[in-house]
Image (cartoon, grey):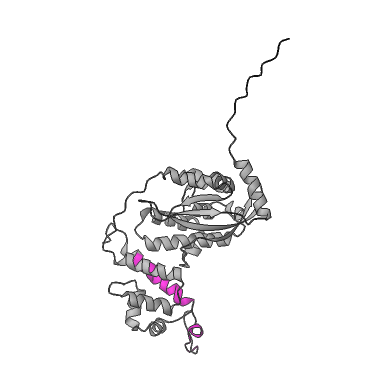
Amino acid sequence: MASRSGNPAANRSDIRNFLISRRAKLTPAQVGLPTGGRRRVPGLRREEVAVLAGVSTEWYTRLEKGRVSGVSEDVLHAVARALRLSEDERTHLFDMARAARAARRTPQHPESAELPPSVHWMLESMTMSAAFVRDRHLDIVAANTLCRALYAPLFDSPTTAERGHANLVRYIFLDPGSTHFFADWDAAAEISAALLRAEAGRRPHDRALRELIGELSTLSPEFRTRWARHDVRLHHEGVKRLRHPEVGTLDLPYRSLNLALPGRPDHEVIIYTAEPGTTTEDRLKLLSSWAAPDPPAVGHPVRHESVG
């Protein structure tokens, strides 16, 4: 019977499916093995991965079944090299292995609903950048004024109204309007699913995360397709092209920065800015001017009429 720390079988299944998906992407020619003979499935065979990793087929088969107890880090490194895993994929494999070995869930402190005021001050000080804080479920837990104006379609979305807070992945997969707002919707969908996949590897016992994944898998065929690929991503940076309903198309470089806060693991600050001298900068300035709060009213001095 599974303990209340989570479902060990689900964790083993994640390891198994991840390794199978990675070896399916490699061909014998890519790794210097003979290419002859018929193959029933794409990619490398288990025994070929074992040879490349320098371990027995039995050991690799055991690992691919998710049975990581007794498997050393040296073996995991060798398998990662054999499968030519990226840095993010390698980290994901080790995260899943550590989670599978844990006898019980590490106690987690409840996260406060409120961020320190200094975080909000920091966000609002970025007057020409749209900035927000995102948690591990891709909830937006704080945003500056320009971000709320830039991401108006998200904050106004039914997916936000239903939950009382904005969630990027729900908006992308459950609001049809997101396909227009994100000019490269496929890339946004792939990145958000890959971020959740990496987080699920780190925290397989996070009930709220599992519920979110279950909801998306039930309601969105597009999410199910991407989830089945087992692609992972740990960092969120690049250039986002958005179609804003008021100012038009914006090409915005963005970057994520870790936000170290006690009791709030894995919060990140995401910052969108514009390249100087571009049309996007002009449009972002226009949006910022519209979004800026009205200045406080200033009392006018009383004018005394002269009498004469």
Q: Residue at horizontal 48%, vertical 61%?
A: 193
Q: Quadrant of the C terminus?
A: top right
Q: Residue at horizontal 34%, vertical 69%?
A: 97
Residue 94's place in the image compared with 169, above or below, is: below
State left or right for residue 134 relative to residue 182: left
The span picked out in magenta is 11-35
Q: Does residue 28 show up magenta in the picture?
A: yes
x and y percent of residue 154 in the render? Answer: 55, 48
State left or right for residue 100 relative to residue 212: left
Q: Nearer the viewer, residue 1 or 60?
A: 60
Q: Residue furthest top?
A: 308
Q: Residue furthest front?
A: 308
Residue 250 appears in the picture as rendered: yes
Q: Quadrant of the N terminus?
A: bottom left
Q: Nearer the viewer, residue 210 or 124?
A: 124
Q: Residue at horizontal 28%, vertical 64%?
A: 102
- Give residue 280's quadrant in the image: bottom right
